[in-house]
Every structure is written in C-alpha cells, then in structure tokens.
Image (cartoon, grey):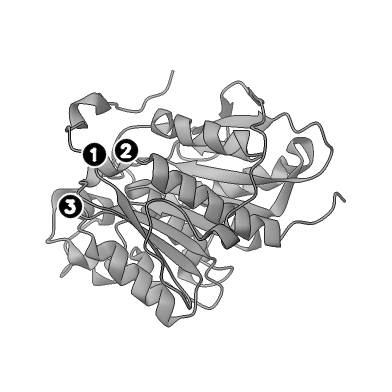
Amino acid sequence: MRWLKRSDPRRWVPTLLLGGWLLTGCGATHLGERSVPTSQAAPAAAALAFDALPELTYTPPDWPSSLHADVLLPRSGSDALRPAALLVHGGGWQNRGPEDMVGIAEQLATRGYVTVNIEHRFAPEHRFPAQLHDLQQAMAWIHANAEAWRVDTDRIVGVGFSSGAHLVSLLALAGAEGPLAQPHGGDHARLAAVLAGGTPSDLFKFPDGRLVVEFLGGTRAEVPEQYALASPARQIGPSAPPFFLFHGTWDRLVPVDHATDFRAALEARGVENELYLQHGRGHFLSFLTRGDAIDAGIDFLERQVRSLERSTH
C-alpha cells in the first residue's frame, strides 16, 4: 500500500557486538553498561497489551502528499490520560519507512504510550522544510485525536533514528515562533522530551554529500541559511526539552562528534540531556543492536513524562 522505497536491513549486520557508555548531562556524568543510576531509574511496571489501529492518513486532504501513520493504543484499564510518542524512521530523508520503528513503537506501547509511527515526504522531490512540516502536521493530528485516544498533550515525546532523529530534534527545537515554527508549527507541536539515535546534528559537518545537498537544495556555499536552519545543534533555544542521545563510536556515516558536540551545546544552554555511547558500533549496527540504549532512553523519557503527569480532565 505504501509508496515508500525499502531495502533489507539484514545486509547491515556485522558480527561484532560490544557494550555502551552512558553520559548524563546537567550536573553529573555516569559511565555504565546501560542505564541511569538506580536512584533515578523508572520503577518496574507490568507490560501492557495494546491494540493496533488500521493504517490511518494523518494529513489533510489538501496536503501535497497523502501520508500515513500506524497507531498503537495501550490497554491501560484506566480512563487516565497517558503519554504519546511520535516516531520517525531514518533513511537519509529519501527512503525506508515506519516498519523500521515498529519494535520501538511496540516497546513504548507496552510502557503505556500511545504511539504514532509516521511516513514523511522524501527528498529530492520534496526539500526541507517539507519533512518538518509533515511532523508538525502529525502533531496537530495527535492533538485532534487526543480525547479519543486519551492522550495528555503535555506529555508527547519524539523518537527517531538517523534522519528521523534529525527531524524530531528539529521539531523539538522549533519553538512556537520563528522560522522553523512557520507556518505549520506552534504550541501544538511542542515535545516534552526526545529520544534520538545517530543524529545528524550539524549539517555543515558533511562535505557536500549527495543526500544533504538533495535534502537542502544546494551546497553549504550555495544555501548556508538552509544548513543553519536544518542543524539542530544551531537551533537550541530557551524552550528546548530534555534530550536522550545514543550514538555508535565507530559511526562513519554520521560521525560521533555529531552527538558529543550536540550534547556540549545542550549542556551550554542548561538543557537536561543524556548521551549513551555505543562502543565499537557503526551507524547501522547502532540501530540494529540498540536494545540497551533504547531501554535507557525509555527510562529517561519515563522520568520526563512522570514529572509532567496530571489527572484526567
């Protein structure tokens, strides 16, 4: 049904699997195998069953492309409002699809999150900021369905990998005003926290490679303003939400300095953050063997949404 181009992720799997390091920002640094200190860990909870809705269109009829979302609704046994997660797949802004994020979506649903796993438009046919506008439209759609799905709109988080992590990071940093918020952003597009892996955080770091040039419509010299707008590390403002980053130390497609420099920029602005370094892993392997990093990331999200929890209206 979907028009997305896909490839077989199994061709990415090398045989070397190593451990990870967790660096916790804003006041403390921790080195560990997978998680935050015991005193900060989320309490264990029974896994919830969930229901998958039929594939839904999240874009309005006049949108340039009809885009779909896969939604999972936890069976919480309560009328209380619950958090939601917007999930965005990787693929260099040009290919792959929501099926890459199914495992993470299901993991979040068992923890009580309504999950919305979306498609977005592809470059080079659709250039930035078209993809960000798609995410902003998806957030408007979540808000429109919040009552039916019992979503607490103050507790929507963003989750992505690679180019998907780039897009959810920009969404989180767009704010309610300014060039990234116009014309489809605003208060409805705010995220409470972000879980992002393999994030291209500063597009000036890429030496005019094809994917970035086709995404932004030119080289660094030709469209520097696009590179600045599309670089999360250059868009951190006072309303930035907490970030959990994970990244492979052997990543050659998106080198690890994208994560360490992004974390330093978040630190400099007082934004709560954690960085989980996956030792000895490249870009694709860091996603395929993401288990401990995702576990630690969901614990991080849990702490953020728990602090914002409110009663049912």
Query: Residue at label 3?
Result: 250
For marks 2 and 1, give the one nearer the viewer: 1
Q: Residue furthest right?
A: 313
- State which quadrant residue 84 falls in: top right
Mark 3: which amino acid? Trp
Is disc 2 in contact with disc 1, using a CB cutoff of under 8 Å?
A: yes
User: How far apart are labels 2 and 1 at the CA level?
Assistant: 8 Å
Q: Is residue 129 visible?
A: no
Q: Nearer the viewer, residue 210 or 310?
A: 310
Q: Residues within 10 Å of mark 1 (few under 14, many from 20)?
A: some
Residue 252, numbered label: none
* 241 lies above or below 301: below
* 141 lies above or below 187: above
Question: Which circle's residue, 3 or 2, is located before the other in the chain?
Answer: 3
Question: Which circle's residue, 2 or 1, is located before the other in the chain?
Answer: 1
The spot of residue 142 in percent (x, y) is 65, 43
* 263 lies above or below 172: below
User: How far apart are labels 3 and 1 at the CA level?
Assistant: 12 Å
